[in-house]
Amino acid sequence: MLDRRQILVGVAALMGGALLPASVKALHGSGSAGAFRKATLSEPQMKAITIMADIIIPETDTPGASGAGVPAFIRTAMANWLLKEEAQAFVDGLDGFLEAHPDFPRQDITAQTNLIAGIDSSLHDLPEKYRFYRQLKELVLIGYYTSEVGAAEELAYDPVPGGYTIIPVTSETKAWST
């Protein structure tokens, strides 16, 4: 029987290794994953995460990140799966962002979107104070596309791809290994 960690490792492999390397180690059960359990994300931190997640994947004809439960997924990942150092770096970066932009949660959606779009446009060359954003974006994408909403409503889901094809078997036919 597969457990959640094995499934996420498989999803990460299918996504081309989108998880941070330390996250993969945490999902495999090595390192100090789960050491962040005693600390929780504060309400202002969760509000900022929710706003950013909904900017990354907004609601359209399908639910957005919040509708798919992505903020709760991120809270769970922080508490149970990420390495302590990785989780702490994320929280420190988020706190730095909130210190630099204390009015972010109260801004209108246009101002919030413009700020996040500016950060997102420099994703490959982020200043130190925004490094947490890359990890946030990865967690949002993983949380969304492994949720029921992302997997079944946003993406096309085919539990058994391909049609049924009868393959005649004779004594000379080799068995299939795939």
Image (tube, rainbow, N blue to C red):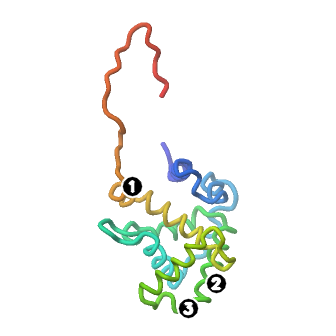
Q: Earlier in the sequence, mark 2 or mark 3?
A: 2
Residue beneath label 3, please? 102
The CA span between labels 1 and 3 is 35 Å
Residue beneath label 1, please? 151
Residue 96 got which mark?
2
Residue for point 49% across, 82% down: 114
User: Decide: marks 2, 3 in contact (CB < 8 A)?
Assistant: no
The answer to whether residue 22 is above or below residue 111 is above
Residue for point 52% across, 78% down: 116
The CA span between labels 2 and 3 is 10 Å
The CA span between labels 2 and 1 is 33 Å
Which percent across, then down, holds residue 96? Answer: 64, 84
Residue for point 47% across, 62% down: 143
Which percent across, then down, holds residue 95? Answer: 61, 83
Crowding near the residue tagged with mark 1, few <14, some 14–19, many ≥20 C-alpha atoms within 10 Å:
few
Residue for point 34% across, 44% down: 158
Q: Amino acid type of disc 2?
A: Gly
